[in-house]
């Protein structure tokens, strides 16, 4: 029990010292956006070339989700590790001495937590467009996947817009527009 309390304390400290919640929110949105659009691209690409099968979508979609997850987690960890090390050096230069202990430990924890969020987000979002292919025939699944994915993008955009308490619909529609533009580009690339 003491170690759980200690971990909670370190997480709270990392959150406060390194502004972790906004960073995690950004990484979640970026990762989820990537995951949803990538898998929608896989689905629409398969359809555009006449190879749409549930098996292909499930296997390729899951593989793409895993690849995005690993790529996002490693990329986020390395980017945050470098940025926190640079920030740490700036603090040491300003203080004219080395800074050890809690700040360095919480930076490492913050980097790991950021990487985790950015890694899990695309994997979660990848399952959104894949799910209809588990239950429906291919054509119906594709239409459902597009609708569900655009709905997910709308909800994510609305959430971000609500943080500013303004332009909720505008932000939501911008996310949907990105999804529609992606669909159009994939169709144009895959067309004969």
Image: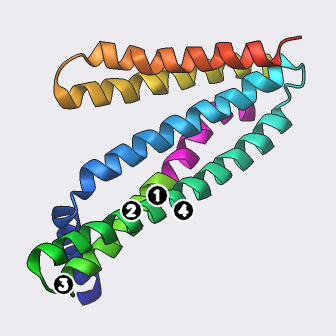
On screen, residue 130 versus residue 125, left or right, reads: right
Identify the residue shown where x is 18% and y is 84%.
Answer: 99
Q: Tag 3's secondary structure? A: loop
Do the numbered discs 1 and 3 sit on residues whose CB atoms are within 8 Å? no
The secondary structure that most of the magenta stretch takes on is helix
Which residue is tagged 1?
76
What's the distance in space between the residues labelled 2 and 3, CA to CA? 18 Å
Camera-nearest residue between 180 and 139: 180
Task: Determine whether label 1 and label 4 are within 8 Å by CB.
Answer: yes
Discs 2, 1 touching: Cβ within 8 Å: yes
Q: Is residue 156 left or right of residue 139?
A: left
Q: Is residue 69 above or below residue 18?
A: above
Residue range corresponding to the magenta coloring: 120-135
Q: Quick check: is 122 in the magenta stretch?
A: yes
Mark 2, residue position: 80
Question: Is tag 2's residue or tag 4's residue first in the polypeptide sequence?
Answer: 4
Please tell me whether mark 3 or mark 4 is closer to you in this view.
3
Residue 160 placed where, x, y %? 30, 30
- Badge 3 crowding class, 10 Å Cα cut-off, few under 14, some 14 to 19, many 20 or more, is some
In the picture of the structure, the residue carrying the numbered disc 4 is: 74
Q: Can the viewer see residue 113? A: no
Labelled disc at residue 99: 3
Mark 4 burial class by Cα count in 10 Å: few <14, some 14-19, many 20+: some
Would residue 52 be counted in the magenta stretch?
Answer: no
In the rendered image, the vertical position of residue 46 relative to residue 58, given as above or below: above
| Disc assigned to residue 51 | none
Question: Where is residue 170 shown, x and y percent of the image?
Answer: 32, 13
């Amino acid at each position: 029990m003491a170690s759980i309390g200690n971990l909670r304390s370190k997480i709270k400290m990392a959150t406060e010292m390194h502004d972790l919640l906004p960073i995690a929110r950004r990484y979640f949105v970026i990762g989820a956006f990537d995951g949803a659009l990538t898998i929608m691209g896989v689905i629409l690409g398969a359809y555009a070339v006449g190879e749409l099968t549930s098996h292909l979508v499930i296997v390729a979609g899951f593989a793409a989700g895993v690849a995005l997850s690993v790529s996002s987690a490693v990329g986020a960890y390395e980017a945050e590790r470098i940025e926190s090390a640079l920030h740490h050096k700036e603090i040491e230069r300003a203080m004219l001495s080395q800074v050890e202990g809690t700040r360095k430990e919480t930076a490492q924890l913050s980097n790991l937590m950021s990487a985790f969020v950015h890694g899990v987000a695309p994997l979660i979002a990848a399952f959104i467009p894949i799910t209809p292919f588990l239950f429906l025939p291919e054509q119906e699944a594709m239409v459902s996947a597009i609708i569900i994915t655009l709905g997910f993008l709308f909800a994510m955009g609305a959430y971000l817009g609500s943080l500013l308490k303004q332009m909720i619909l505008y932000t939501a529609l911008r996310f949907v527009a990105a999804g529609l533009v992606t669909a159009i580009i994939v169709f144009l690339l895959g067309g004969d």
